[in-house]
Each structure stands twice: as structure tokens, then as C-alpha cells.
Image (cartoon, rainbow, N blue to C red):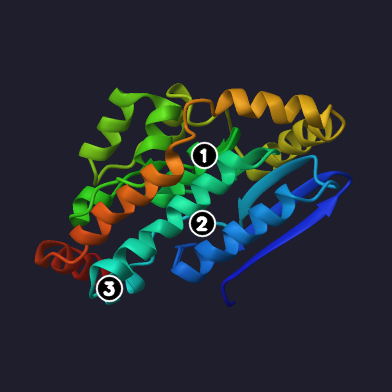
Amino acid sequence: MNAYVTSTIENGIGTIEFFHPQSNSMPSSQLKNLVDEINKLSQNDDTKVIILKSAGEKAFCAGASFDELISIKDFETGKTFFSGFANVINAMRKSPKLIIARIHGKAVGGGVGIACAADYTFATENASVKLSELAVGIGPFVIGPVVEKKIGTSSFAQLAINATEFYSAEWAREKNMYQDVYETPEEMDAEIQILAEKLANSNPEAMSQLKEIFWKGTEHWDNLLVERAGISGNLVLSDFTVNAINQFKHK
């Protein structure tokens, strides 16, 4: 199957689904399409609440596309690529709609950022998390602010420093990255539907103002996350990072 990002609206519930054949990784085109769909549903009065999910049965999102990372040869290209993740996070936080994330499998790097940028996150027991950026010589600079906001500085540091280790879904729930964890996707989907239907029948203005409160203090992130993208865009050019990514690709 080819990569895609699609969206639908039914009974006030907007659903965005993304897919990429390489473990739902994120090349630039996929990031742009995801931003476009988030903005489209956010601006549609028929949408009362948004569910964000990925397709497939394995990883929720493997983060940045290694194929694209290894092709970056100059700073501006690197900054532009990492700004794609900044744009997704900023679109999610600025949406006037509450966003529910459905994390059915492993979340790595940018996938953790997406999970943390949602307003309410459901997961299965298979949804372990890892910030692998430092292991390839970069560091989770762009997604760092949203992960730190959701789980706190100490837990963010633990993930960022121990960059080769997966942490369980239960760990993520204990740190408030996930609000609820279920044994099976079916159990999770049933609970997501119940909450989404409740929110679809709630006061849109109240939910919008509540979301503003949730994200108060992040107004500078439009600039901050792009600045952070520049840090990653510079580091991705180093020999260390190029060699590390090539090693990962050939495992």
C-alpha cells in the first residue's frame, strides 16, 4: 500500500488516519498532508471532536523517515524537514477542537510527540514508547517541549537520555502520556467511541475555551519549535549522525 492521510466526519466526529508502509514513518510529504487534514477538520463547523489514528497492526508511528534523513545535504533542507514535525504539533495545539489520539502500537520519536500533542490519549498494552533521536546523533529537540509539557522534565529526560530503550505503555500511563491503556484494540476503540460521542454532543465553545486553557503558555511555540528544527537540521549533517542512521537502516 502507498502512504496516505485521509479524514472523514460522521455525526460530529472527525477522524484522521495516516499510513506509511515503513512502520508509519514520516517523510516531509506525509507531515504536510497530516497538517493539512488537521487544519481542514479544525476549520469545519461540522467537526466537534477529532480522533487521530494510524493504520496497520504494528507501529503507531516510527517517527522521522530515515530514507529522507539520510538524503539531507544542507542546513535549510534539514531545518525544513524537522519543521514538518513542528507544524504538526502546532496544528494540533492550535486546533479549536479537542483531539483524541489512538495509539495502537509502538510510538518512536515524532510518534511520541504526536501522542503528547493530543488532548486525550488512548493506547493499547503494545504501545510502548522510545525517543531514539540521541542514538542517531540528533536529540528530540522539536518534540521536546510538548513531551516535557505532558510528562514533566524528569520523565522527558529519562526518555531522551536512555535513547535505545523502549518504555512500556503502563510506564507512559503512569507518566500521564496516556490517559487509558487497554489490552486489545477492540476494547480501546469502544472506549474511544464512547468519549468521542460524548464530546460531539458537548458545547463546542466550552471545549474550545477549555483547550485554550490546556495550552496556555505555549503561544511562542510557533517560533520555538522552528528554532529547535534548526538545531536538528544542523546536527543531521554531522558525520556521526550520517553513520549512525546508516547503521540503523542496515540492521
Q: Nearer the viewer, mark 2 or mark 3?
A: 3
Q: Earlier in the sequence, mark 2 or mark 1?
A: 2
Q: Quadrant of residue 185?
A: top right
Q: Earlier in the sequence, mark 2 or mark 3?
A: 2
**Residue situated in front as seen by the camera: 12 or 101:** 12
The residue depicted at 48 percent of the width and 55 percent of the height is 61
The answer to whether 227 is drawn above or below residue 149 in the figure is below
Q: Which mark is residue 173?
A: none
The answer to whether 52 is drawn above or below residue 179 in the figure is below
Q: Indicate left or right for 43 with 81 as reference.
A: right
Q: Indicate left or right for 101 with 198 as reference.
A: left
Q: Which residue is mark 1?
A: 117
Viewport quadrant of the N terminus: bottom right
Residue 204 can be seen, yes or no = yes
The residue depicted at 79 percent of the width and 51 percent of the height is 44
Q: Amino acid at mark 1?
A: Ala
Residue 251 can be seen, yes or no = no
Q: CA distance from mark 2 to mark 1?
A: 21 Å
Looking at the rendered structure, the secondary structure element under dot 2 is loop
Q: Earlier in the sequence, mark 1 or mark 3?
A: 3
Q: Position of residue 112 (x, y in %)?
A: 43, 44
Q: Position of residue 7 (x, y in %)?
A: 73, 59
Q: Which residue is mark 2?
A: 58
Q: Amino acid at mark 2?
A: Lys
Q: Nearer the viewer, mark 2 or mark 1?
A: 1
Q: Amino acid at mark 3?
A: Ile
Q: Which residue is mark 3?
A: 72
**Residue situated in front as seen by the camera: 193 or 98:** 98
